[in-house]
Image (cartoon, grey):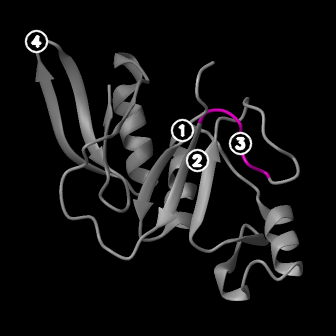
Amino acid sequence: MPLHWKLVIDCADPLRLAAFWAAALDYAVEDNSALVTRLLAAGALPPEAVTEFEGRPAFRALLAVRHPDDPFDPATGTGLGRRILFQAVPEPKETKNRLHLDLHPGPAAREATVTRLQSLGATVLRHVKENGGEWTTMADPEGNEFCVQ
């Protein structure tokens, strides 16, 4: 049986990066407000671990995005399919990513996608054209590299 997985990205501001990547991928930001509320009421989560995101309670140190067509647990808001979790860590990013996302809008839509991602806060690092293909390497608002092919 295949394993369930999620991609976890360490960052300084998980709410900001989740909002960026949800817009970039046209994904849904997970709504964990019911779980957060239950954990607060049970005393299992201290109030300082909670913030507000899009008008609802959210974990301060983590937030995930999921493919909008994938199932999720209605009791927790946690996605059960393709998802990316952003978690706060104290140290800043220092070197090149060893793992990154490749976005595939196709050659005809590459330039428009790059422009849209820049409007969301991404930056262009370089444009690459070689025998194996063509792509634009970009960085998200915290400097995490990704490619648009």
Q: Is residue 52 above or below residue 25?
A: below
Along the viewing direction, whichever of 111 and 17 lies nearer the viewer: 17
Give the spatial CA distance, label 3 vs label 2. 13 Å
Residue 81 magenta: yes
Q: Are marks 1 and 3 in contact (CB under 8 Å)?
A: no
- Where residue 2 sits: x, y (%)? 59, 21
User: In the image, what residue type sits under mark 3?
Assistant: Gly
Report helix, strand or loop for mark 4. loop
Give the spatial CA distance, label 4 vs label 3. 38 Å
Q: Which residue is mark 1?
A: 25
Tell which circle, 4 or 3, labels the residue nearer the N-terminal end: 3
Q: Which residue is mark 3?
A: 79
- Where residue 74 sits: x, y (%)? 87, 47
Q: Which residue is mark 2?
A: 22
Report helix, strand or loop for mark 2. helix
Magenta extent: 77-82
Q: Residue furthest front?
A: 1
- Where residue 46 sits: x, y (%)? 72, 85
